[in-house]
Image (cartoon, rainbow, N blue to C red):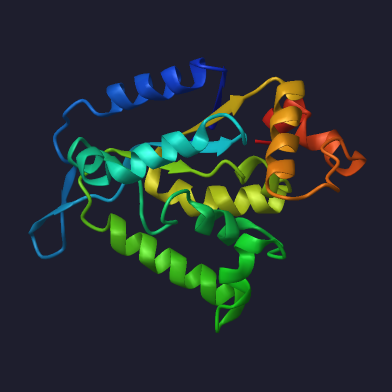
């Protein structure tokens, strides 16, 4: 499997995804195989996985809302936007792959009765249940925080290991926004939420969050 990084900027990001969806949604015959009992079963191997890893402030919520609302229609057209990985974006998969879960969205891992490994086992089982017998040819996974939350080789390998066994090909979708515009948008949102102590250009985040070359090379 070769991971290809597709980079789009501004309005081109949504146009690129729309084109990809149109191509992937062309009617295709269901892939089937003979089981040990001689019955025909639908294969759960997807031809392509579009793995949308970010970045933030590039219209990702609109894309995810469209996918969520049109779950059944997309599935009918051969595209699966799995519900098992998260109700809107696929934060559960992000938590699955992450090494730490101290942030707010990590509570579902911290509060799991069987800890991190129990959470990972449960998510794997729920995902396998959802794709079992699925006739879709294309898998779409989206979380705009993948790029900033999963940064170590171990985390990225864990993400790949979850997806790779079920897909013949993985294509990474990465939408970029000019760094100064991203910084202003991020800061504006933080101020509107009632905070005043946020430094969007803090030294800790400059070296990677706004370093698109390193981000692309990392994935």
Residue at the limit of the structure toward the right, as seen here = 203
Q: Position of residue 6 (x, y in %)?
A: 54, 23
Q: Nearer the viewer, residue 11 or 39?
A: 11
Residue at 83%, 40% (x, y): give it: 205
Is residue 54 visible in the rendered image? The answer is: yes
Q: Is residue 106 above or below residue 133?
A: below
Name the quadrant of the C terminus. Answer: top right
Q: Position of residue 106 (x, y in %)?
A: 63, 64
Q: Is residue 70 above or below residue 129?
A: above
Q: Is residue 139 above or below residue 41?
A: above
- Drawn side of residue 161 relative to residue 78, left or right: right
Q: Position of residue 104 (x, y in %)?
A: 65, 62
Residue at 71%, 47% (x, y): give it: 153
Q: Quadrant of residue 17?
A: top left
- Drawn side of residue 165 relative to residue 129, left or right: right
Q: Quadrant of residue 136?
A: top left
Is residue 50 visible in the rendered image? The answer is: no
Residue at the limit of the structure toward the bottom, as seen here = 113
- Drawn side of residue 93 relative to residue 210, left or right: left
Residue at the limit of the structure toward the left, as seen here = 39
């Amino acid at each position: 499997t070769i991971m290809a990084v597709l980079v789009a900027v501004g309005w081109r990001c949504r146009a690129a995804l729309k084109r990809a969806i149109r191509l992937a949604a062309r009617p295709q015959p269901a892939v089937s195989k003979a089981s040990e009992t001689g019955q025909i079963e639908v294969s759960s191997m997807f031809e392509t996985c579009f793995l949308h890893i970010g970045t933030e402030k590039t219209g990702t919520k609109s894309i995810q809302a469209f996918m969520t609302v049109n779950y059944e229609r997309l599935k009918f057209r051969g595209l699966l936007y799995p519900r098992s990985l998260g109700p809107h974006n696929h934060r559960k998969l992000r938590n699955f792959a992450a090494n730490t879960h101290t942030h707010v969205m990590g509570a579902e891992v911290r509060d799991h009765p069987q800890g991190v490994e129990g959470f990972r086992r449960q998510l794997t089982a729920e995902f396998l249940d959802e794709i079992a017998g699925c006739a879709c040819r294309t898998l779409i996974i989206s979380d705009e925080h993948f790029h900033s939350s999963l940064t170590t080789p171990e985390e990225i390998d864990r993400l790949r290991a979850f997806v790779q066994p079920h897909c013949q090909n993985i294509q990474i979708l990465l939408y970029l926004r000019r760094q100064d515009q991203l910084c202003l948008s991020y800061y504006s949102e933080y101020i509107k939420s009632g905070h005043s102590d946020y430094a969007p250009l803090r030294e800790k985040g400059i070296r990677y969050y706004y370093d698109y070359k390193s981000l692309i090379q990392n994935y």
